Image: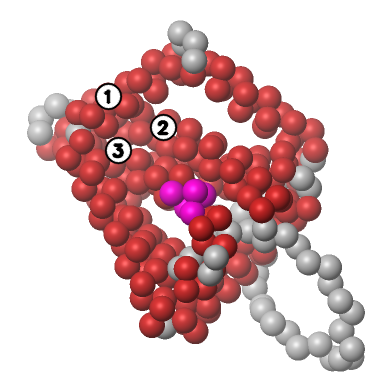
Amino acid sequence: GEGWKRRKPKKRERSKNPHPEAKRVYFRPEGLALPGYLLNPASGWGFLLLSLFFGFLLFQPSPFRAWLLEALALLRAYRGLYLFTNLFLYGLFALGSLLAYGMPEMARAVQALFGGALEAIGLEEATGKGILVLAGVIFHWNFGQGLFLTGLLPALLLGVPVFLLNALRYLVFGFALSPALLGAAFLVHLPTLLLELQAYILVTFGGLVLLAKTAGGEGYRKGLRALLLTFYLGALFLLLAAWYEAWEVSVLL
């Protein structure tokens, strides 16, 4: 899910070989499969309305706007730590991208592994359902699996687990999504990568602020509030990324 370029499904051609060769074997995990209702056109329209309503609230006096301003103030207050987190994780992504030039075959194998995982959970089914449905599915996957399960939850353990997890993840993502493999399509996909990766950087930063506040004597509770603010801001980045990526896949690619 995170930062992965989803392509339009191609029409299947009937094989002339009566015994087609197996290309991939995988388990289809029921627990991670997409809920069927997400592929309904009504869900796409619902996601559009929720997005517009959320955007409206951000420009009005509301708790949503207050949380946004508080989150931005947190970034300014810990600008050094925020800058370090960005440079470190984006740097690992860039390093992985460079390594792919020297090991293109291995990079393609990692890319195929990611593609098989997305196919197994059913994300490919959403590509033919239109921009609205696709945007909702992308946001559901990135928010649930990326920002919450592998972001917020490990960040609750004083930030260290999510920092280590994302360090490895960004290196592997850079390896699999390198310009060496994507070619010119990398530039089209770059806004998606920057937005989605920034969302996970934010929750990683929030975990480190939690660690700093707890170790500095301010208490876990204040650190937890900071983490939740970065989680909220990360969700906003994922919302923007979902709409761009759905448009990218449906129109540009």
Label 2 to label 1, Cα distance in Å?
12 Å
The residue that appears at 56% across and 22% down in the rendered structure is 54
The nearer-to-camera label among 3 and 2 is: 2
Label 3 to label 2, Cα distance in Å?
10 Å
Q: Provide residue 179's location: percent of width, then percent of height.
A: 47, 68
Q: In this view, does 215 lie to the left or right of 88?
A: left
Local packing at callout 3 (Cα closer than 10 Å; few below 14, some 14-19, many 20+) is many
Q: In this view, does 213 lie to the left or right of 30?
A: left
Q: Which of the image's four quarters has the N terminus?
A: bottom right
Q: Is mark 2 on a helix, strand or loop?
A: helix
Q: Name the residue under label 3.
A: 206
Is 231 in the magenta? no
Within the image, what quadrant is residue 207 found in? top left
The residue that appears at 55% across and 22% down in the rendered structure is 55
Q: What secondary structure is the stretch in magenta mostly built from?
A: helix
Q: Is mark 3 on a helix, strand or loop?
A: helix
For the record, the magenta segment spans 190-194
